[in-house]
Amino acid sequence: MAKHRACSYTYYEFFAGSGMVRAGLGDSWKCLFANDFDDKKAASYEQNWGEDEILVKNITIPGILRIPVGGCACEALAA
């Protein structure tokens, strides 16, 4: 029988809003980075997933974005 890992896939959640992508993907996916520039949306994300889980900044400004390493994010969700 195949052994299942708790987290099989990783992704980055840009413009995360309240984190519905994270909710939809479930526990077999791990969010390595979440971002939103809207304070109200980020507050909703923080309520759902914790305040250390999201970067509240406009990442389109050069030099702002520092994406953590430690996994290989799915390009379809990162684009």
Image (tube, rainbow, N blue to C red):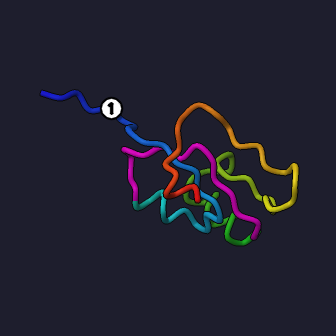
| 28 lies left or right of 52 | left
Q: Is residue 31 magenta?
A: yes
Q: Residue at x 44, y 59 (%)?
A: 23
Q: Residue at x 61, y 50 (%)?
A: 50
- Expressed as whole percent of the image width and height from the top left, the position of residue 52 reads 68, 45
Q: Quadrant of residue 59?
A: bottom right
Q: Quadrant of residue 42?
A: bottom right
Task: Kindly identify the amino acid type of the residue bearing the numbered disc 1.
Answer: Arg
Q: Residue at x 40, y 61 (%)?
A: 24
- Expressed as whole percent of the image width and height from the top left, the position of residue 53 reads 64, 48
Image quadrant for the N terminus?
top left
Image quadrant for the C terminus?
bottom right
| 75 lies left or right of 3 | right
Q: Is residue 68 magenta?
A: no
Numbered range of the magenta stretch: 25-38
- Expressed as whole percent of the image width and height from the top left, the position of residue 39 reads 76, 68
Q: Residue under circle 1?
A: 5
Q: Quadrant of residue 48?
A: bottom right
Within 10 Å of disc 1 (Cα), the crowding (few <14, some 14-19, many 20+) is few
